[in-house]
Image (cartoon, rainbow, N blue to C red):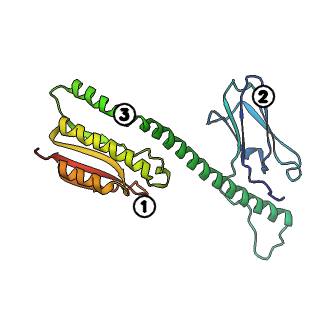
Amino acid sequence: MTLSSEVTRVDAVGDDSTVEFFFNFKTLSTAHVKVFLDSVEQGTGYSVALNEDQESSPGGSVTFLDPPAVAVAVRVQRSMPRTQTTDFSPFAAVRATTLEASLDAIVMQVQEVDAAGTDYTDERETVLRADFNVLENAASTLADAQASAAGAMGSAFAALTQAGLAAASAGAASGSASTADAARIAHLVELAVDFCTRQLKPDGVLVAKLFHGSGYSQLVELFKRTFRVVKPIKPKASRDRSSETFLVGIGLKKS
C-alpha cells in the first residue's frame, strides 16, 4: 500500500436520525478505529466495517446502534498502537507485502502523533483566546470590583492577593506577550497593586504572573516602591522557552 493522504480522522455532527458515518482514511484493522461522542471515547454501541481494498478505496464506516443526538459531535479517528509487531530475522527472506505493511504502519503512527500535536496547539490557542476576550473587559470593570471588594471586606484586610493577570495574553501560546498585550497586563497589575495598598495586610503578599518584555522592568520598579521584599520566581513547571515569570511582593512599605 501507499499513503497519499495525511487524514487520520473525520468529524461529523449527530442529527438524531443518522446511524452510519463514513471515514476515508486508510487503516490496517478495525481495532485501530476509535469513536468519540462529544470528545468521550465510546467502547460499545457501534460497529466498524472496512472497505475491502484499502489501497484503492481506503476507509470504511461506523454504524451506531442508536443515532447520535442532535448537535452531538461525532469523531471517527485512527489510533495505531505505538508498537512494532513484525520481527525480521537476519538473512531470512522478506516478503515485499510484509515490508510494505510495516512501513505503512510507521507512517500512520507518525501522522497520528503529528495530528495530536496540532490538536494540542489549537485547543490551547482556543482556551487562551477565550480567556483573553474576558480580560479585554477586565480593565474597565476591575476598579468597580475593587470598590465592591473593599466594601465587602470592611475593616478586614487581605493576607494574600493572587493576580494571574497575564495568563491569557494573545501571545501566550508561544510563551511571550505582544506590545498591546503587555500594556493591558501592566494596567491590570497596576490596579492590583493599588488594591493591595488599600486592602492588603502590612505583612501580606501579592503574587502576579507576568511576561518578560515590554513594561516588565517598570512593573518590577512598581513592586519595589510598594513592597519591602520583591522576588521574581520562575516555576519549574514553566517551559524553558517561555518568558513567563511570577513576581512576588512581600510586606507593604510604610507610606
How far across and down, in percent of the image, does residue 212 sit?
Answer: 37, 57
Comparing 36 with 238, the one in front is: 238
Q: Circle 2 — which element? A: loop
- Find residue 99 and name its label: none
Gap in angstroms between the C-alphas marked 3 and 2? 49 Å
Locate residue 62 relative to residue 191 in the image: left or right.
Answer: right
Are the residues at dot 1 and dot 2 in contact (C-beta closer than 8 Å)?
no
Q: Amino acid at mark 3?
A: Ser
How far across and down, in percent of the image, does residue 149 sit?
Answer: 26, 28
- State which tag comes first along the sequence, 3 or 1: 3
Gap in angstroms between the C-alphas marked 1 and 2? 47 Å
Locate residue 106 relative to residue 221 in the image: left or right.
Answer: right
Residue for badge 3:
140
10 Å crowding of disc 1: few (<14), some (14-19), many (20+) = few
Comparing 206 with 88, the one in front is: 206
Q: What residue sits 71% from the left and 28% below the top?
A: 14
Which quarter of the rendered picture does the C terminus lie within? top left
Mark 3 or 1: in front is 3
10 Å crowding of disc 3: few (<14), some (14-19), many (20+) = few
Q: In the figure, residue 192 lies in which quadrant?
A: top left
How many numbered tags mark residues here?
Answer: 3
Q: Amino acid at mark 1?
A: Asp
- Above or below for 162 versus 2: above
Mark 3 or 2: in front is 3
Comparing 202 with 89, the one in front is: 202
Q: In the figure, residue 156 lies in which quadrant?
A: top left
Which quarter of the rendered picture does the N terminus lie within? bottom right
Residue for badge 2:
19
How far across and down, in percent of the image, does residue 180 sit?
Answer: 43, 49
Residue for badge 1:
240
Q: What residue sits 69% from the left and 51% below the top?
A: 80
Q: Amino acid at mark 2?
A: Val
